[in-house]
Image (spheres, rainbow, N blue to C red):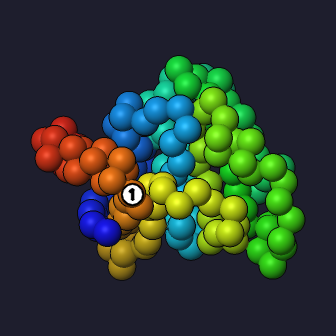
């Protein structure tokens, strides 16, 4: 599995990177987001939403588990944080195999329900206050998407 990294010095850059990725996504695509509280997972999701032309304000679905947004492709924003130590399946397959794009925060808590192929992104704090975005594409489909984006000069700005 290949690993790619970007350093983001602002919420604006994090959203821009996510919006660029969103333009390459298709129905049925899955993105998982890992990172500490406040690392920027929801900020990244807001960028995905912007790229999909979602007009509603995107907020963390921590207490509702799943929020749905209408855009050029529907966006299913999931937060599995409250599902730690739970084996309850709340119908993830319906979303993962549905007609939208799924973004899952705290995906490690529902690992057994996740599709084998997905784009895993880890967001971590740096001492400088910047964020390191580490992209771990799982499967050739996601490897191709990320490889294309990292060779695109706009993605590296």
Say whether residue 129 is left or right of residue 72. Answer: left
What residue appears at the point 74 percent right and 42 percent down from the top-left corner?
Answer: 94
Visible residue check, residue 59: no
Q: What residue is shown with label 1?
A: 139
Q: Is residue 103 above or below residue 79?
A: above
Q: In which quarter of the image is residue 123?
A: bottom left
- Residue 63: x and y in percent read 83, 55
Label 1 environment density (alpha carbons within 10 Å; few <14, some 14–19, many ≥20): some
Q: In this view, does 106 lie to the left or right of 34?
A: right
For residue 89, which quarter of the picture?
bottom right
Q: In this view, does 96 lie above or below 82?
A: above
From the viewer's perspective, is residue 123 above or below residue 142? below
Between residues 36 and 26, which one lies in front from this camera angle? 26
Q: Which of 128/106 is in front?
A: 106
- Dot 1: element: loop
Q: Which of 115 and 23 is in front in this view?
A: 115
Q: Residue at x 68, y 69 (%)?
A: 112
The answer to whether 50 appears left or right of 9 in the picture is right
Image quadrant assignment for residue 2: bottom left
Apparent side of residue 7 relative to residue 133 in the rendered image (left or right): left
Out of 119 and 34, give the one closest to the viewer: 119
């Amino acid at each position: 599995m290949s690993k790619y990294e970007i350093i983001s010095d602002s919420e604006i850059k994090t959203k821009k990177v996510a919006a660029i990725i969103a333009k390459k996504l298709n129905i049925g695509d899955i993105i998982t987001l890992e990172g500490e509280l406040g690392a920027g997972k929801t900020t990244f999701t807001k960028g995905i939403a912007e790229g999909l032309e979602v007009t509603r304000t995107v907020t963390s679905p921590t207490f509702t588990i799943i929020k749905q947004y209408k855009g050029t492709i529907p966006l299913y924003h999931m937060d599995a944080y409250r599902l730690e130590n739970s084996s309850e399946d709340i119908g993830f397959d319906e979303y993962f195999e549905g007609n939208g794009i799924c973004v899952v925060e705290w995906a490690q808590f529902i690992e057994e329900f996740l599709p084998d192929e997905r784009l895993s992104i880890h967001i971590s704090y740096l001492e400088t206050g910047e964020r390191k975005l580490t992209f771990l594409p799982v499967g050739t489909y996601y490897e191709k998407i990320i490889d294309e984006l990292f060779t695109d000069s706009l993605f590296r700005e």
